[in-house]
Amino acid sequence: MASFVALAIFTFCLFCLVSCDAASEPGNGFSVELINRDSPTSPFYRPEETHTQRFSNAFRRSIGRVHHFNQESSSVFPTTVESEIFNNQGEYLMKISLGTPAFEILAIADTGSDLIWTKCRPCVECYQEDAPIFNPKASSTYRDLSCSTRQCRSLSERKCKRNQCHYSYSYGDGSFTVGNLAAETITLGSTSGRPVALAKSVFGCGHNNSGAFSGQVSGLVGLGGGSISLISQLGSSIGGKFSYCLVPFFSRTANSSKLNFGSKGVVSGEGTMSTPLIRKNPDTFYFLTLEAISVGKKRIKFPSFSSETIEGNIIIDSGTTLTLVPEEFYSELESEVESSINGERVSDPTGTLSLCYTVESDIKVPILTAHFTGADVKLKPLNTFVQISESVTCFSFAPIRSGAIFGNLAQVNFLVGYDLQEKTVSFKPTDCSKK
């Protein structure tokens, strides 16, 4: 689950509504507006929280996210539309509607998982929630899926009861959902105002849900590469293309980002750089190949994760805030960054990050370049340093023992496009507040 298990994640609320006509015509595109959870316009905004508290919460979830990626990689399974995304301390939230008549829910948008699910009545065991719970009996288009369906068989673990497919899905932070795999009409809303209904979409009707879910969040929308994700279910209607543009964390000039599908998800034009998208098992995650990171003119080679190949050695994830790299590589990277900065070092008030300075030092941050295969992505200071409090700013990279994740702070003010047909991920420097 990309959003709950991350060191620091952004929360996006995607107000997605997709019309049948738009979704059924290949080449049509749509976008959803994304809103930072921590902005005053977000439904999750808590004025009593300090800047430091918000980051501390996000960083803690990022650590759990690392466990999620490592577990999923070993198949762990415990018992043209434009959309608005809201930043929720590292979680991306989107509004979708289920059923007939349509029942609106607020769900986490997660590029690190596949299943679309929501809490359903009767809810045998559920986390406390302020919002109403979906009642499948009130919908004329709801139906349970049998165990013989392709979608049921695609689950790594499932159970059959009276020929009904029952799923169990868990995340790295211990959160989980258990319920019926079902088909239902899912409605997404675009910024154009034209709703799109996706008939017979596969989702999880969760009757047993627990974990680190917010009281206003009713479920999750999987945007990964697996067969039951929203991206895969949209299929040929979006041509395997989607993109997003993330505004800076705690932006004061604009509070919304965009998630784009289909023709509007194409990233091209001057300044666009593309790198191969590597598909691995599991196909949920989006892997890239990072060859090195440069600090100024100093190039630091990225280590291979195996003796055979370095392809697909890092996951790009919109749900993890920090960029996480192997420990030895991080040590060399931090040392080089530190040697390039004159400033007063201090401790991170959240107790998470290693390289921090006082804001009063007026430090000059070096330009870092992420050298992906075929794409040299220049990271500006807002991509590599994050202001933790009024007086402290920290290097937004962190060490992990295994794996690597290119997080969302590094992706801020880039139009990031995924083309699953051409198997590429593209980066285009963009002022996302004007996108």
Image (cartoon, helix red, strand yellow):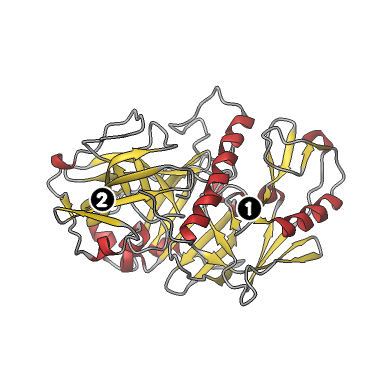
At numbered mark 2, what does the secondary structure look like: helix, strand or loop? strand
Look at 62% across and 77% down and name the residue there.
308
Look at 53% across and 65% down and name the residue there.
287
Q: Mark 1 packing: few (<14 Cα in 10 Å), some, or many (20+)? A: many
Pick the front one: 254 or 101: 101
Q: Position of residue 293 (x, y in %)?
A: 72, 63
Pick the front one: 249 or 293: 293
Q: Position of residue 392 (x, y in %)?
A: 74, 35
Q: Mark 2 packing: few (<14 Cα in 10 Å), some, or many (20+)? A: many
Three-letter amino acid code at disc 1?
Thr
The label nearer to you, 2 versus 1, is 1
Three-letter amino acid code at disc 2?
Ile
| Spatial separation of the CA atoms under disc 2 and disc 1 | 33 Å
Q: Is residue 297 left or right of residue 190?
A: right
Q: Is residue 389 left or right of residue 275?
A: right
Q: Quick one: which residue is furthest to the bottom in this view?
A: 308
At numbered mark 1, what does the secondary structure look like: helix, strand or loop? strand
Q: Is residue 238 above or below residue 158?
A: below
Circle 1 sits on which residue?
A: 323
Q: Is residue 144 visible?
A: yes
Which of the two discs, 2 and 1, labels the residue nearer the N terminus?
A: 2
Circle 2 sits on which residue?
A: 186
Q: Is residue 387 above or below residue 292?
A: above
Pick the front one: 163 or 383: 163
Q: Position of residue 86 (x, y in %)?
A: 46, 41
Q: Which mark is residue 359?
A: none
Q: Quick one: which residue is furthest to the left in this view?
A: 140
